Amino acid sequence: MQASKLTAEHQIFRETIRAFIHKEIIPHIDQWEQQGEIDRNIWKKMGDMGFMGLNYPEEYGGLDLDFYYSLILCEELSYCFSGGFTISALVIQYMSAPYLLKYASEELKERYLKPVIAGDMVSAVAITEPGAGSDVKQIKTTAVRSGDHYIVNGSKTFITNGYYGDFFITAVKTAPEKGTKGISLLLIERNAAGVSANKINKLGWHASDTAELGFDQVQVPVSNLIGVENEGFSYLMAGLQLERLTAAIHSLATADSALQYTLEYIGQREAFGKKLHDFQAIRHRIAQMAADIATTKAFVYQCCDLQNQGEYAVQDCSIAKLQASELAVQVVSNCLQLFGGYGFTEDYKIARLYRDVRVGTIIGGTSEIMLEIIAKMTIDKVNYEPNKIRLT
């Protein structure tokens, strides 16, 4: 991103969100990590500051700002040493609520989008199933029309905000015989009769709730249909680029936070009569990580430019997500090594980062899926249709 793209107003916003994080979030992170639950009051505080609706229209309570504000928010949240908290925030604003803005009726926007932006409700997106991950067309959850309702049966898994959230943007089969052309999106409330949720015990992201959901004869009003029936697959594909871009920003900022944290440690720790940062082998390892982060950051920022321009940049966002998530795993692992035995203890936050960063190569499409998308566009000359629908 050209330096001119970030204005004085952007920098003021960075300082504002950073001060907010240090006051309202970081003091509570350890507790949230230990209890496996984020205090819902934080969403209201963020909503009151406008942080939950940066790119959303003012008519729904948003601030209608450019995407660079979201870039800054994603980066700063990623420096709080809790991937679980950060992903919960990103799922609300960039991975679930956008479907309401772009496709939902005005009634649904009034009842659900406005409260999300205000911080009064927590949203989730429910796509993945026990037998269908990256291959969305294989989902089995069905929604059968019965009068003024759909009857939903099935299950979902690995759903962030699925246990403590208020509602899910849920992918269902309304015409199973039509494959991807028979998928729809329904808004299903967490407390609806027949909905069950079980928390998943995870390797990392302990602060966030990740749930397995069950739908047993759940009655969902037809008015909760998001967009047009059987058009859900195209909606999901259009939303993936923003999801992958924000995931890339998060991964990269996590890598940088690990590096900065490690620099503080090796500047204080001594071995054989000198500081760790004075050993050439360590200096060169640090230099290589800094170089890798800088070059990847330049590309991710270029993708942010495309997002701000409303471009449907499938290949670019896939590359960004692939490179940033794989690099983050590598950097955090290298950083932990420099802590020696202390890196293997909970006394140092590098251990938490090590657990949290690993899932970055899986969420939003695995690295293998990213590689296949890039291969199709590079080798097979597949040209995904541009989609000019924007979040802003």
Image (cartoon, rainbow, N blue to C red):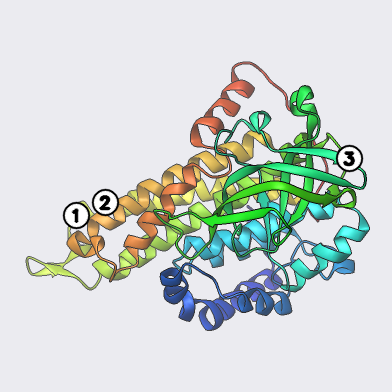
Helix, strand or loop at label 3? It is loop
Is residue 310 visible to us here?
Answer: no
Q: CA distance from mark 1 to mark 3?
A: 61 Å
Residue 62 image point, x, y percent: 80, 68
Marks 2, 3: nearer the viewer: 3
In front: 254, or 308?
A: 254
Question: What residue is disc 2 on?
Answer: 284
| Residue 180, image x, y percentages | 75, 28
First of labels 2, 3 by sequence position:
3
Earlier sequence position, callout 1 versus callout 3: 3
Q: Mark 1 sits on what residue?
A: 280
Q: Nearer the viewer, residue 88 or 74?
A: 88
- Report the number of numbered marks: 3
Element class at badge 1: helix
- Which of the 4 image quadrants contains residue 74? bottom right
Q: Are marks 1 and 2 in contact (CB under 8 Å)?
A: yes
- Above or below for 129 versus 119: above
Q: Residues within 10 Å of mark 2 (few under 14, many from 20)?
A: few
Farthest residue to the bottom: give it: 23
Looking at the rendered structure, the kind of residue marked 2 is: His
Residue 353 seen by the camera: yes
Residue 24 vertical position relative to residue 170 in the rendered view, above or below: below
Horizontal relation, residue 72 to residue 281: left or right: right
Q: Residues within 10 Å of mark 1 (few under 14, many from 20)?
A: few
**Camera-nearest residue between 85 and 164:** 164
The residue beneath circle 3 is 228
**Residue type, numbered disc 3:** Val
Q: CA distance from mark 1 to mark 2?
A: 6 Å
User: In which quadrant will I find the C terminus?
Assistant: bottom right
Say above or below: 203 vs 346. above
Q: Is residue 355 left or right of residue 160?
A: left
Q: Is residue 38 left or right of residue 215?
A: left
